[in-house]
Image: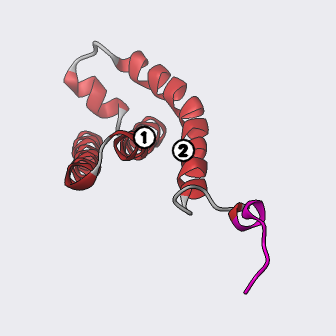
Amino acid sequence: MQYLTDRKRAVGLGAAHTGTQSHWAMHVSSVALVFLVPLFICTFGHILGHPYAEVKAYYSHPFPAIVAGLTIVVALKHFASGAQMMIEDYAAGTTRHALVIGAVCLSYAAIATGLFALVRLAL
């Protein structure tokens, strides 16, 4: 038998024993979005309102296409993580599992759709 205090047993463990990883991932993705969103706004705003042929030619260059792709992936992964945390805090039972699966599936579907549209536009 170990003689540990309650505090010593709890050091390094969140309430679910895994909270630190998702918390850190949210911080990393939010810092990435601090840089990506202004870049995306600048690159997208520059071409907004132009004809389709010019937009297609603009996104055939690597920089705007990479910025748009990274913004789509990082923003929607951040959304999925945040939605999952919110659902886990406020829902219970089978409803919780269904909502988490739905939010994650919605996020991955949006990522796939956005990247597919970007690839079609860039090529």
The amino acid beneath tag 1 is Gly
Q: What residue appears at the point 76 percent right and 59 percent down from the top-left corner? A: 7
Q: Nearer the viewer, residue 97 or 26?
A: 97
- Tell me which corner region of the image, top left, top right, bottom left or bottom right, holds residue 118: top left
Q: Residue at x 57, y 48 (%)?
A: 23
Expressed as whole percent of the image width and height from the top left, the position of residue 110 reads: 25, 43
Left or right of 112, for residue 64: right
List the residue tagged with mark 1.
Answer: 82
As drawn, the residue found furthest toward the top would be 49
Q: Is any atom of residue 97 visible in this view?
A: no
Q: Residue 93 bears which disc, if any?
A: none
Q: Residues within 10 Å of mark 1 (few under 14, many from 20)?
A: some
Percent coordinates x, y for residue 100 in the rendering: 28, 50
Mark 2 vs 1: CB contact within 8 A: yes
Is residue 55 rendered to the left or right of residue 46?
Answer: left
Residue 17 in the image, given as x and y percentages of width and height = 56, 63
Is residue 73 located in the magenta-colored stretch of the structure?
A: no
SS assignment at label 2: helix
The quarter of the displayed image where residue 83 is located: top left
Q: Quadrant of the N terminus?
A: bottom right
Magenta stretch holds residue 5: yes
Say what amino acid the circle numbered 2 marks: Met
C-alpha span from label 2 to label 1? 8 Å
In the picture of the structure, the residue carrying the numbered disc 2 is 26
Left or right of 55, for residue 31? right
Q: Which region shows up in magenta?
A: 1-9
Which structural element holds mark 1? helix
- Ranked by sequence position, the earlier of labels 2 and 1 is 2
Q: Mark 2, residues whose alpha carbon is within 10 Å: few (<14), some, or many (≥20)?
A: some
